[in-house]
Image: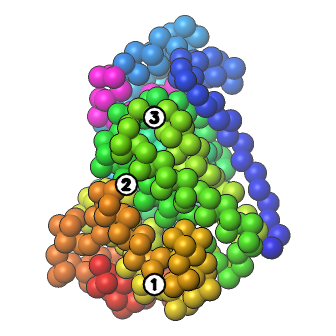
Amino acid sequence: MNNFTYYNPTKIEFGKEKENNIGEYLEQSGIKKVLLVYGGGSIKKNGLYDKIIISLNKNNIAFEELSGVVSNPLLSKVNEGIEIAKNTNIEAILGVGGGSVADSAKAIAVGAKYDGDVWDFFINKATISEALPVFTVMTLSATASEMNGNSVVMNDITKQKYSIASVLVNPVVSVINPELMATVSPEYLAYSAVDVISHCIEVYFTASVHPNFNSRIVESIIKTVMQTTEILIENPNDYDARAEFAWAAIQGLNGLTPAGTGGGSFPNHMIEHSLSALFNVPHGAGLAVVIPAWMKWYKVQNIPQFKRFSKEIFNSEDENVGIEKLENWFSKIGAPVTLKEVNIPRESIEELAINANELANLWGFGALYPTGSIIEILEKA
């Protein structure tokens, strides 16, 4: 096991009706005015918006609003939020929604304390040194953005889907009430499950050092996600299954699973970001397409871990069976597994590969994934 530092400053408030206390949590942190960030209006239809406003008013928290965040969050919307934050003396950002809302909230929090273009942080032109505090109330579990410092945003103009990471934008408090997630569509439940699994297997397969304990954590998360997803497909109102899914999703990318590992990377996310950026594919759907193709291409580089995955998850000694069964499971729950299923023509593979390679270079592993290799992977999809 490698040396490591593990620190996560986010406080999780987990359980029924916790959203009613968001104003109290803000007040306890000394916050007097927030920018409320949310999506397309579903929180108004289901009554969550009213609960948030009542809680803010009860605790004398003033607020401005930014709505319209989409599933592949846009830089233009982030810039809109930054302008509001700077012009109205916002003290904190409150994201109410899924991962895209949380990611947008974090990017706004960084940009609000910066005189330049917030995109500078995404292209490594600037380093995050300060940010407004972030709070979240989650309506979907997938990205673990509620307990990490990551933010992924798409530049509408350049068609680049890039990320930032800083503990400074770890949410101060995140509210997770599984009841708020009961209306998630079967489609997005499937995409969420794929996303959680992807967070777990990236380092699991690519790390040069991966302790047994870490592998066991990853395998437990994957098994939990698969089991609870199938329960929720049959009964979306199963609170216990929804709660276990939500808690497992958080562990997938809150810094726990890679602690003590070494040499890992995120090639599936690197490739998928090009699908989202160029074709607006939902993130989890794109990952469902990329993961089996990448596994088929990459398996020869780490046969022992692929054998372990097959045995622990699917009770098979054959590394190929694990890949096949995971791909079949993605299909079973309603996720796409081919480029054709997400309406991406074969002729676009080279364009996707060039876009993905630019991100690979930015993330520091472009030599491992030249354009030609990414083309080979996408051809398997």
Q: Along the line of sight, which residue is nearer the eye, 334 or 361?
A: 334
Please give left or right for residue 248 compared with residue 340 in the image. right
Judge depth for marks 3 and 2 and give the one in front.
3
Q: CA distance from mark 1 to mark 2?
A: 23 Å
Label 3, label 2: how far apart the Cα atoms are: 19 Å
Give the x, y percent position of residue 329.
38, 64
Is residue 342 something that shows in the picture?
yes
Q: Indicate left or right for 237 with 219 as reference.
A: left
Pointer 1 residue: 320
Tag 3 near tag 1, CB within 8 Å:
no
Q: Amino acid at mark 2?
A: Tyr
Please tell me which of labels 1 and 2 falls first in the chain: 2
Could you tell me which residue is drawn at 68 percent across and 35 percent down?
A: 11
Query: Where residue 231 sits: x, y (%)?
Result: 43, 45
Considering the numbered disc 2 on the image, is that residue within a helix, a strand or a loop? helix
Q: Nearer the viewer, residue 315 or 310?
A: 315
Q: Nearer the viewer, residue 143 or 304?
A: 304
Q: Quadrant of residue 67?
A: top left
The boundaries of the magenta stretch are 34-46
Judged from the image, the secondary structure of the residue bearing numbered disc 3 is loop
Judge by depth and name the residue closer to the eye, 211 or 321: 321
| Amino acid type of the residue tagged 1 in the rendering | Asn
Residue pointed to by mark 2: 191
- Residue ID for mark 3: 238
Q: Identify the residue shown where x is 79% and y is 65%.
A: 4
- Answer whether residue 118 is magenta in the image: no
User: Callout 1 environment at 10 Å: few (<14), some (14 to 19), or many (20+)?
Assistant: some
Q: Label 3 vs label 1: CA separation?
A: 34 Å
Q: Earlier in the sequence, mark 3 or mark 1?
A: 3
